[in-house]
Image (tube, rainbow, N blue to C red):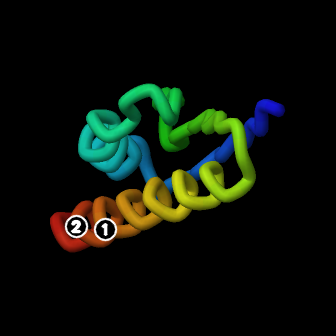
Amino acid sequence: MKINCKLNLKFENEKIAKTIYSSIKIDDLGYVESLLDKNKIIANISSNSIGSILHTLDDYLACISVAEKIAQSNK
């Protein structure tokens, strides 16, 4: 069974979204397909099990959180 999850993450402005996207894009590595659309990051995550997708989501959102804190501190 294939499990898919789509995240739409909206940020304060395009500059912050681009900074975060640039920081996390390298970590996609076949688990996440992401794209930048103005001030949004759209991420599609696929997995073969619920446990695996939850682990991937947890890691991805943790990376987003750290990148967002850094981007906000550089405003």
Between 20 and 60, the one lying in front of the other is 60
Tell me if 57 is positioned left or right of 24 in this view.
right
Asked where in the image residue 69 lies, by quadrant, the reply is bottom left
- Looking at the image, how many numbered discs can be counted on the residues? 2
Q: Is residue 26 above or below residue 68?
A: above
The residue sitting at the left extreme is: 74
- Image quadrant occupied by the C terminus: bottom left
In which quadrant will I find the N terminus? top right
Tell me, yes or no, if residue 8 can be seen here. Answer: yes
Residue 71 percent across, percent down from the top left: 25, 61
Which label was assigned to residue 70?
2
Query: What residue sits 31% from the left and 68% below the top?
Result: 66
The spot of residue 33 in percent (x, y) is 52, 28
Which one is in front, 52 or 31?
52
> Which percent across, then down, holds residue 8?
65, 45
Q: Secondary structure at mark 2?
A: helix
Cα–Cα gap, marks 2 and 1: 6 Å
Residue 15 seen from this side: no
**Amino acid, disc 2:** Ile
Q: Nearer the viewer, residue 19 or 31?
A: 31
Measured along the vertical axis of the image, is residue 69 above or below residue 36? below
Q: Residue at x 49, y 42 (%)?
A: 39
Q: Is residue 11 rendered to the left or right of residue 14?
A: right
Viewer-side label of 2, 1: 1
Please report contact status of discs 2 and 1: CB closer than 8 Å, yes or no: yes
Q: Quadrant of residue 2?
A: top right
Q: Residues within 10 Å of mark 1 (few under 14, many from 20)?
A: some
**Circle 2: is it few (<14), some (14-19), or many (20+) Cα within 10 Å?**
some
Task: Tell me which amino acid carries mark 1.
Answer: Val
Q: In the image as oriented, which residue stretches furthest toward the right? A: 1
Say which of 26 and 69 sits in front: 26
Query: Mark 1 highlights which residue?
Result: 66
